[in-house]
Image (cartoon, grey):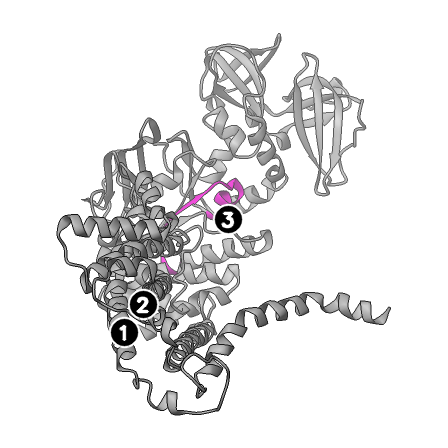
């Protein structure tokens, strides 16, 4: 990355961690701008927690650097780093009361009058008056706040959050997501948030890095990642995608023509991550619309014919499964706005999309599997996709800071 | 009908009370006999109530010497076994090294070996090494079997401790030493205390191993054994009751403190 390194940026360069034969983190390069809310998103075992622990100093990197500003902190002990962590299990000291838990870091740094700071920090996380209680007497959400206060009171340069909301129930999690954003805005500290929950990452972070097998697959603003994923993994991990195995033969003018299962499609050059050879043609389910027949497809849209094999009504939308002529299944979400037509199972439909909403991804040449994702990932994605439009809406309101891919 | 219903509702309680009574009865007898003035040396009937035994516990001087010796041996053995055992427990739980599983097995050996075997083999060892038997051979013998119980007790406590707590302390600017002193030790402390109490009572109480390795030293259990042949002085019951009372007091205080700190 060609930019001058500002004083407070956290930069990981060539960071690698091996456990025996297993490479948990593989030559990672990453820049987290000062003051940003950064999310490391990935499935369990992708190396995101190991990365976090290396920043905290709880794991020694096999090689590479952890730079805070211009200082390499990779070889420092955890207590020598201006970095604090909110642990997944909170790790509150059970033998100390809440106030002493929060004061722990201050006392260790030899600060004498801690009462004022502790009180202010407890007020920030809305736990005024709970200072004398023991962690075991608090609810999960309250413990989470104590863990946050205990880390934040030290004013670290970087706050690390290791799946901090994982143990909370859904409603509390939503509430804490908003809370965390509020606090981050208030204190302006760099937050690095590790999570496997794509919705959480998109809701909270300015920048999301999707990790897979110890590497960063893609990094960017949540809307950019969602609207124009860089790899098939990202396309399916972040929400859900219809991916058609296709062949491309280079751009022709402003468009890239592709062939998939004998049919011809095209899309703008700017929507292609790869324009030659084996590719995936991708369309998000909510951007795949249904029409009763091919002549009802709007001008400029492209379509494939199919038959509805499943229609599940989920309130805000109806999720259709459409079997195409060549036997693969597409997913389409139709908003239940009362404007569109409803299709029963067995109805012939034309699934159409605006080529500007499609994207082209590189594909390993080989068997033309339309669905490269694993079943588990698919299921994890499905529940969340219903909410996707809501995030995008919010994302548009708040201008996202865009950063180039690492 | 009503009676059987009444029984069905309470039979767990009834059985529990019976078991408790069964366990407490011998102690009650000892406590009662500590207030007895026996009619003769070999009589164990409750003859007459008196406070003399409590007022003059050292009327038989041999006995008090024996108690003192047992306390001394118990104290030294407890301190040594607790320190050694705690260190061993830390090593076994926290580190992966060659021979770790072998040592784990070895730790269990003194608990599984019949005391008779342990006593005789220790005696053979001391004799062949030319070590005169006495106070220090007893300390060595007691440390040997106490250390196993300490390791097992502290290990259990340590294994149940969340490693993240120490990581959190280090993350919050506590050096290795401060982490140990402020987080690890306070959390493991109840286990260490329990181990020490266990070690002391094991040492104080031991007869078989002690009898083989005592030389001319007489501990309290040995004194009681010897006295049993010619009539136990009632002061033995005073010592027994006092020990029981002290133990009860310790348990009461610790549970009271636990309850207070949980509030």
Q: Is residue B53 magenta?
A: no
What label sits on residue A173 in the rendered view? none
Secondary element at image label 2: helix
Mark 3 Cα shell of 10 Å, populated few (<14), some (14-19), many (≥20): some
Subunit under mark 2: B
From the viewer's perspective, is residue A169 above or below residue A236?
below
For the point 45% across and 87% down, which residue is it? B39
Q: How many marks?
A: 3
Q: Chain of mark 3?
A: A
From the viewer's side, name the closer residue of A203 and B115.
B115
Q: Nearer the viewer, mark 1 or mark 3?
A: 1
Marks 3 and 2 in Cβ contact (< 8 Å): no
Residue of label 1: B66
Q: Nearer the viewer, residue B142 or A244?
A: B142
Is residue A154 visible in the rendered structure shown here? no
Q: Residue B212: x and y, percent?
A: 27, 57
Residue B8 in the image, given as x and y percentages of width and height: 76, 65
- Say which quadrant the C terminus of chain A sits in: top left
**Picture coordinates of residue B99, whole percent (x, y):** 28, 37
Q: Which residue is mark 2?
A: B222
**SS at mark 1?**
helix
Q: Quadrant of residue B215?
A: bottom left
Disc 1 packing (10 Å; few <14; some 14–19; many ≥20): some
The residues tagged by marks 2 and 1 sit, at their Cα atoms, a distance apart of: 8 Å
In what quadrant of the picture does the N terminus of chain A appear?
top left
Name the N-terminal-most of marks 2 and 1.
1
State the residue at coordinates (55%, 13%). Answer: A246
Report the residue marked by disc 3. Answer: A166
What residue span does the magenta drawing correspond to? Answer: A185-204
């Amino acid at each position: 990355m060609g930019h001058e390194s500002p004083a407070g940026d956290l930069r990981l360069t060539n960071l690698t961690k091996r456990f025996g034969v297993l490479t948990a983190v593989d030559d990672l390069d990453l820049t987290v701008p000062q003051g940003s809310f950064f999310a490391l998103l990935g499935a369990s075992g992708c190396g995101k927690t190991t990365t976090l622990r290396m920043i905290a100093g709880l794991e020694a990197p096999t090689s590479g650097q952890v730079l805070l500003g211009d200082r390499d902190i990779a070889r420092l002990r955890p207590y020598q780093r201006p970095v604090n962590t909110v642990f997944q299990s909170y790790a509150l000291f059970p033998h100390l009361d809440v106030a002493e838990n929060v004061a722990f870091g201050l006392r260790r740094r030899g600060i004498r009058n801690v009462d004022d700071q502790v009180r202010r920090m407890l007020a920030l996380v809305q736990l005024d008056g709970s200072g004398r209680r023991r962690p075991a007497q608090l609810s999960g959400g309250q413990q989470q706040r104590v863990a946050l206060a205990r880390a934040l009171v030290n004013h670290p340069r970087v706050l690390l959050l290791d799946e901090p909301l994982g143990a909370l129930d859904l409603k509390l999690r939503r509430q804490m997501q908003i809370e965390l954003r509020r606090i981050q805005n208030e204190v302006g500290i760099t937050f690095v948030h590790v999570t496997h929950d794509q919705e959480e990452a998109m809701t909270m972070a300015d920048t999301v890095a999707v990790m897979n097998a110890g590497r960063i697959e893609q990094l960017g603003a949540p809307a950019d990642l969602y609207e124009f994923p860089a790899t098939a993994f990202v396309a399916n991990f972040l929400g859900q995608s219809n991916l058609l195995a296709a062949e491309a033969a280079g751009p022709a003018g402003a468009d890239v023509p592709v062939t998939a299962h004998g049919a011809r499609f095209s899309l703008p050059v700017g929507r292609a991550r790869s324009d030659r050879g084996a590719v995936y043609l991708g369309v998000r389910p909510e951007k795949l619309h249904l029409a009763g027949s091919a002549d009802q497809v709007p001008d400029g849209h492209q379509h494939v014919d199919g038959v509805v094999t499943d229609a599940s009504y989920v309130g805000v939308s109806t999720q259709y499964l459409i079997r195409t002529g060549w036997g693969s299944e597409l997913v389409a979400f139709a908003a239940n706005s009362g404007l569109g037509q409803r299709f029963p199972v067995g109805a012939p439909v034309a699934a159409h999309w605006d080529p500007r909403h499609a994207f082209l991804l590189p594909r390993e040449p080989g068997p033309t599997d339309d669905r490269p994702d694993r079943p588990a990932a698919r299921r994890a994605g499905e529940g969340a996709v219903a909410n996707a439009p809501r995030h995008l809406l919010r994302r548009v309101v708040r201008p996202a800071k865009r950063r180039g891919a690492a | 009908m009503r009676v059987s219903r009444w029984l069905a509702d309470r039979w767990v309680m009834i059985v529990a009370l019976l078991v408790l009574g069964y366990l407490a009865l011998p102690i009650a007898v000892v406590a009662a006999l500590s207030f007895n003035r026996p009619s003769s040396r070999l009589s164990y009937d409750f003859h007459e109530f008196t406070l003399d035994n409590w007022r003059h516990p050292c009327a038989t001087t041999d006995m008090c010497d024996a108690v003192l010796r047992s306390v001394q041996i118990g104290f030294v053995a407890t301190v040594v076994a607790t320190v050694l055992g705690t260190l061993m427990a830390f090593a076994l739980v926290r580190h992966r090294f060659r021979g770790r599983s072998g040592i784990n097995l070895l730790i269990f050996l003194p608990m599984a070996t019949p005391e008779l075997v342990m006593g005789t083999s220790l005696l053979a060892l001391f004799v062949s090494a030319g070590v005169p038997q006495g106070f220090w051979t007893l300390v060595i013998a007691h440390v040997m079997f106490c250390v196993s119980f300490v390791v097992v007790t502290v290990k259990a406590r340590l294994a149940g401790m969340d490693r993240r707590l120490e990581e959190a302390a280090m993350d919050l600017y506590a050096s290795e030493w401060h982490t140990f002193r402020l987080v690890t030790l306070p959390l493991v402390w109840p286990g260490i205390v329990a181990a020490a109490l266990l070690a002391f009572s094991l040492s104080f109480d031991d007869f078989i191993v002690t009898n083989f390795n005592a030389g001319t030293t007489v501990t309290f259990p040995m004194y009681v054994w010897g006295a049993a042949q010619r009539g136990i002085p009632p002061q033995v019951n005073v010592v027994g009751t006092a020990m029981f009372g002290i133990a009860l007091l310790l348990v009461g205080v610790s549970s009271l403190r636990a309850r207070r700190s949980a509030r």
